[in-house]
Image: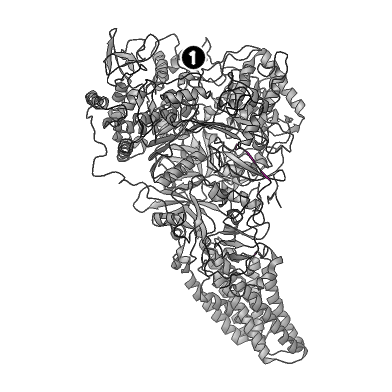
Amino acid sequence: MHPAPSVILFSTLSGMGFGLLAWLGIAQPAVFGTTAFGYYFLAYALAVGGLLASTFHLGNAKNAIKAFSQWKTSWLSREAWISVLALIVMGLYASGEIFLNTSYVLLGYLGAALSLTTVFTTSMIYAQLKTVPRWNHPTTTLLFLLYAVSGGALLSGHATLAAVLLLLTGAVQLFSWGMADGRFAARGSTIETATGLGFMGKVRQFEPPHTGTNYLLHEMVYVVGRKHARTLRVLAIVAGSIVPALLIATWRTSLVVLALAAVVHLLGLLAQRWLFFAEAEHVVGLYYDKR
Amino acid sequence: MTELPQSTERSLGLVIDLDTCVGCHACVISCKGWNTENYGVPLSDIDAYGGDPHGTFLNRVHAYEVQPRDGGPAQTVHFPKSCLHCEDAPCVTVCPTGASYKRVEDGIVLVNEDACMGCGLCAWACPYGARELDQLAGVMKKCTLCVDRIYNENLPEEDRIPSCVRTCPAGARHFGDLSDPESDVSKLVAERGGMDLMPEQGTRPVNKYLPPRPRDREDTIDILAPFLDPVIEEPTGFLGWLDKALGAVSGANTDKKGAS
Amino acid sequence: MNKPVQPMLDTSPRVSDEIRQTTCYMCACRCGINVHMKSGKVAYIEGNRNHPVNKGVLCAKGSSGIMQVNAPSRLKKPLKRVGPRGSGAFEEIEWDEALEIATGHLKRLRDEAPEKLAFFTGRDQSQSFTGFWAQAYGTPNYAAHGGFCSVNMAAGGIYTMGGAFWEFGQPDWDRAKLFMIFGVAEDHDSNPIKMGLGKLKARGAKVIGVNPIRSGYNAVADEWVGITPGTDGLFILSLAHELLKAGKVDLDYLARFTNAPVLVNNDPGSPEHGLFLRDRNGKPLVIDRKTGKQAAFDKKGIQPDLAGQLKKGGKTHRTVFQMLAERYLSDAYAPENVAERCGVPARQIRRIAAELAHVAFEEAFELPIEWTDFRGDKHKTMTGRPVAMHAMRGISAHANGFQTARALHVLQILLGTVEVPGGFRFKPPYPKPVEGHPKPHAGHAPGKPLDGPHLGYPLEPADLLINEDGSAKRIDKAFTWENPMSAHGLMHMVISNAHAGDPYKIDTLFMFMANMSWNSSMNVTGVMEMLTDKDENGDYVIPNIIYSDAYASEMVAYADLVLPDTTYLERHDCISLLDRPICEADAMADSIRWPVIEPDRDVRAFQSVLVDLGVRLGLPGFVDEDGKAVYKDYADYIVNHQRRPGVGPLAGWRGKDGKGAGRGEPNPRQLERYIENGGFFIHHIPEHAAYYKPWNTAYQDWAVDSGLYDKPAPYLFQLYSEPLRKFQLAAEGHGAHQPPEHLRAQVQLVMDPLPVWYPSAGGLSSPPDGASSSEEFPVHALTQRPMAMYHSWGTQNAWLRQLHGRNPLYLPTKIWEQHGFKEGDFARVTSPHGSIVVPVAHQGGLNDSTVWTWNAIGKRKGAWALADDAPEATRGFLLNHIIHELLPPKGDGLRWANSDPVTGQAAWFDLKVKIEKADPPPDEAQPQFAPIASPVGRGPKNLAWKVGK
């Protein structure tokens, strides 16, 4: 899949934002007044910024409002609803903490749940797609949630917990890569099943339908070099998990270190998310003899 | 809207004969012409006269080569591909805006461009590459099965078929109701072993593909018998045979069979 | 479940304001089209269901007409060259000035030396008109593109059976059960072949594709014969060998309808050796089996004897059939002895022969239709032999193509499948014996029209167009001993010969729709140099070039004066029975084009410009005694011109009452009647006249009534071609007209009266070290046109160029693996003439010793209003660069054309090359040329085409 910056930014930033909101919702930490404002500003900037970034991916954003209509079947529509609900509920909760110095605990728990559900719905946009076997697995959801929770923990200053969660996330990520690498083949979609011509013999593309490119190739057939991918995987683990975990485990109280760890984590996360798209092979590539 | 109907009144679709398609791209361009002028926004072409021309097409003809396992010569198969109007169309259910839908009356999967926000998720959900986001208009385009032709009272009855079917010179494209076992298309599918593409995706496509008939067979005539019995072993024996054969010929009347 | 709410959808939108029915011009098919108009603009184009050619279907080219009509590469105004030739620097001028310039050159030449005008029209669909103009002008130098296209196919058929494939005839698609298709890429005759294949496939009939390349029609063939290029003739004669050996030939058919029973002089010393024994009236003689006596072949009631022999005047005579059998029964044609050369296993040859025999004879059938033949014999039924064949450029564009085409027809005739149900059928005005065609003419004099039509079919050496001193009368050396039967001229030699002054220099080159500085020439770089070369005085060697085209093609840049033509929807045309008609086997038909839109530019239809020039020059036929214009434009000519009394360009609705079919006075409302009828006219052949046409009295009478013939002309199929033998006899030293010594052996070999096979590529016409050159260049290199581009120059078409925007060189598995090629690699391809470096791709379904590419995709930078980085210019390429119009010098100082020595057909497919991996690969395909300045600017960036709301 084409690693479009808008979608990468959307899913990483909003994931971290909603992860932070979830921690704030369960009052970890419990913050009030201007401190609270600072936390919530960061969380909303990330969550809303991410959501806004996603609209750059739209060809016809003027109809974006209609995305609320199909919650019965569409994970994207559900994400729209849940994210807005999460933002509203957490907004109310945050108003209490910022302006009234009061935590409405139930509201907070509800907001936290909605925030994580938002991340869940985001993950389901990808995990539901049978056409992308690499994504079409519960680990996709698990990882989205883990990244959100660990990123949130990092931003919310839970040093030890964040370090543990970051390392856990890294471990699950490694495990998930190992699993996902064989999933396309395991699904059994081949150029032979795509064309139905397997009964005749081994199939290969002779000529593409058009000599130039097209939307499908641009959007869904992205070929990433093996070496390049390995480097990025190392970066994703090292920057996404190990370095920030070490940083905060070592200098647990330094705000500067925390900020540095968060930035390094985001860098790793971007690498992870770039790979998430770039390594994901869509079955349509089979029609172009590309996978 | 993006809930799939539990059943449709008919299942209109195409049956594409891979034994007959010569790969001429007539269907591709006829489709482009009709759908540029008709349903929704025109199918645009980016860098139309430049170094990287690429436009929106609702139908594309691939060409594959199949190497038989028994080592015969490689076979070329031309392979037109457009929306298969699946019964379980994943492109419909993922749509957040309700722009994508499957029609109850005939099963056609359509995009209501007035509702499309161009997120592209439906194209991701489609295994077949049937949907293309128009790069100028930013809305999703796909085969409409010429819904604006097949019921069009401004067209003569015989022309109420998709433009690709109407134009196909080799007659490799057939249109009809695949839910009716008595329809011509259903019969073709039954006779010729019509197949689904990527059945493992569980989309239950309405469109079917008729597989190429066996090629390069050596058993077309009795392989135990000699191919042709020589009647003349030596060049000089020819006249003798000819005399005999001519005797047989002129013995018959004027509309007899030929040589034997 | 509740019915969900679905969006409101108008399923009956208005399709168009109006449909205008005219004729497509994207290729030689000439399908009927419905042009849907909205607000006076073209909105959509589809096939015309009632049209005899396409019956509603339409190919990619036809459907993309809207992009052709609106292409940014359309020329806008007459252009006068202001920079050096080839630079593309022009100034726009008014038509008056343009026509004055043209008239200036043409008038002077006509008064002094009309042969110094060379008028060649490329993909012209109005040859009967352009030829008429050239004849009136008086230059002998006129032809269209047939010489570099498929004259072998046309001439091979005409000399053998009075017609050929494509416009001349078609398989009986409705009844054939076995169809063999030889050397047909996606060309003539495109939609009808696809429709026919569809019919065969629907019935489950078997298709055998004989082609080195398994694409297109060969992809759907049930069996593929991946033959080595140039060996089709050998393969075909091997099939004939097997059939003869098994006695699986139609003896009755051969005896009745062919010259198989005709007696041939068998006396080697005689000056008539190999000629037919004839009676006092010149009629060939046969032995009547009933009486054992000799008789004229067409005598009522006789039974011609295939085994006849006759001693007369001390000379032995035997039948054609005996000679034929003797030749092809030779072991030289046994499958085992041809298999390796042809690249086809002996077993496969043998099995195909058996299948042919099986279907022709075991699956024969009778149609209960009575008919009477020319000898008066009544037949109660028509015997069907459901084997049909078709062939095109793949077999004809070789130096042995004429004889290969003949071999194929002989094979069909041996099986008795020509003009019978299930077989191959002629389309009116064919069948027509070779004697029914004109002979070529080149008699010219200042201020006078030519002494007859330019092109024709020579029957004997006296018909050649050579001067007393042996030099050629025509600039292209057509109808000389180098290529006696060059019925379509040799367009590919015009520039080369004019530049060399061989046989003479010319003054003005006048061309129409011929991209001679690019894909329509061999040796492209050389041609560009010839067009720009200057003499010692600093003048161009070819002094004046006038060119007409609708688009900014590569050739435009080389013209001094450009006359911009209209597109096909802006013009009148007639697809005439006098020319290359669109008939069906069951009907005669013709059609028109008419301006369904008006040009939005200052352009004029070329034919109307010719009418105008004809008037300005005062050409006979174009002005009356008072010097006044006879026709005001081409449309006027179409309606009012009469070639013979009552016979004109269009056959339909003739006569004042509009009731004449084929014959009748001009009808001033004729074009309106055509338009009312959808742009075409069709006149059906009665059922009992529909088969056995050359011998069927009912057909012959119908053809006379319909203006096709002036009197019945039944004839025999010429298994043995006496005209060829007359040339061969001359080469053996007989007769007054003798070939030059250097051609004697060649003429003797190639003018064989019975089909003969000789190696073409690097064979017959190779330099003395032919063997070593064949080892150095072991690989055959071919081109095909893709179906979506064939004959249409579709590059400027925004939709079509996306299908084929570049072309790789396809390599067979063996060569691919041998050199370790990978996707994205380039190869250096070298012929004796030069090298190109081009992208490669792999194809498994390809003859082991053959490489190929799509032709005419490669474009020169700056042409066709494309960007300089267009893939056509950077990744596309032409094989033409490494094909020379001449063979490598033989050391005799002579220029030997790379053409078939019988017809002069350009031997495109004789190219042999060597392949090397290009390491490192270049950025762009090589060679590259300086971009041409575009006379029309460049196209818009993006398109979102919609005419209606």
Residue A32, above or below A242: below
Q: Main secondary structure of the magenta part?
A: loop
Mark 1 falls on what kind of element? helix
Q: Position of residue C326 (x, y in %)?
A: 29, 24
Does B19 appear in magenta? no
Does C19 appear in magenta? yes
Please tell me which residue is depicted at 44% across the width and 65% down the height of the picture.
A188
Q: Which residue is mark 1?
A: C463
Residue A205, above or below C546: below
Which region of the structure is painted magenta? C5-25
Q: Position of residue C181 (x, y in %)?
A: 42, 38
Q: Position of residue C729 (x, y in %)?
A: 39, 14
Q: Is residue A19 shown left or right of residue C228?
A: right
Q: Position of residue A234 (x, y in %)?
A: 55, 71
In this view, the residue farthest toward the top is C313
Going by the numbered disc 1, the residue's amino acid type is Asp
Front position in the image: A149 or C175: C175
Observer able to see residue C577: yes
Front position in the image: A162 or C91: C91
Please tell me which residue is depicted at 52% across the width and 15% down the height of the picture.
C465
